[in-house]
Image (cartoon, grey):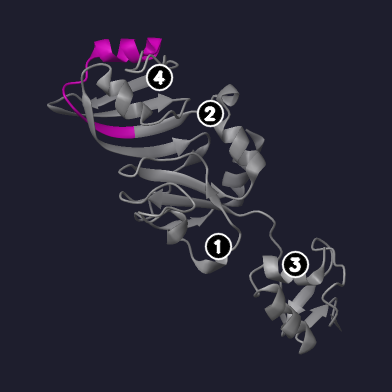
Amino acid sequence: MRLDKLLANMGYGSRKEVKQLLKNGAVKVNEVQVKDAAAHVDPHKDVVSILGEQVVYKEFIYLMMNKPPGVVSATEDYRDRTVVDLLEPEDRHFDPFPVGRLDKDTEGLLLLTNDGKLAHNLLSPKKEVPKLYYAKVEGIVTEEDISLFAKGLTLEDGFETKPGILHIIKADTVSEIELTITEGKFHQVKRMFEAVGKRVVYLKRMSMGSLKLDHDLELGEYRELTDDELSSLLSS
């Protein structure tokens, strides 16, 4: 990899700014000063430093966010703030994108990454990655609803969902439930409850595959995945 590309990718400035750093003698490779922007380095083997600070190379970034309501799951939007807008500049420069989407008013677990292969594996219908949601539902959720969800439901547009595992936490005028599904169609959880005559008034995603929401994260906060979390995701 070209030295200027490595430094630019790691957030040390534009190609022009990086070339100025090199010109000023601020960059060393394996303790040897290098001024040639086109010099080739192996980011996995060579030790690159700027003003004595080692450059830690990362190709991919993996971020867990507790998505707040009112923010859209997109990289850009002309009307609303996006989940990418919530990231610090040093994370945004990796160009991460949300893996799947949560509705604008839905909270909870959202994974952002620039690893396209992982994103594909998590979203592929063939993989049937389970997603767990907590919801408050207007209307008393019943054992009959559990049976209907377990068989799969026909939505208003004729789409037939795969079976879902519905667990009732509290059955009341506003019920509390957990629902596990393996799909992610537009407004799917809300539409599934509409199919049985009920309305979701609050929705939060709790997990996706092996990845569980860190309850220490406040709404809008995020952190990098731990090694164990990442290893579990990559191996699933």
Q: Which residue is mark 4?
A: 164
Q: Vertical placement of 170 versus 64: above or below?
A: above
Task: Identify which residue is drawn at 33% across, 42% down.
Answer: 106
- Observer-nearest residue: 199 or 208? 199
Q: Amino acid at mark 4?
A: Gly
For marks 4 and 3, give the CA distance: 45 Å
Residue 222 in magenta? no
For marks 3 and 1, give the CA distance: 15 Å
Disc number at residue 91?
1
Task: Identify which residue is drawn at 54% across, 49% down.
Answer: 97
First in sequence: mark 4 or mark 3? 3
Disc number at residue 129?
2
Disc number at residue 226?
none
Residue 142 in magenta? yes
Q: Which residue is mark 3?
A: 6
- The reply to whether callout 2 and callout 4 are in contact (CB within 8 Å) is no
- Secondary structure of the residue carrying tag 4 is loop
- Disc 4 crowd, CA 10 A, few/some/many (<14, 14-19, 20+): many
- The reply to whether callout 3 and callout 1 are in contact (CB within 8 Å) is no
Range drawn in magenta: 134-153
- Secondary structure of the residue carrying tag 1 is helix
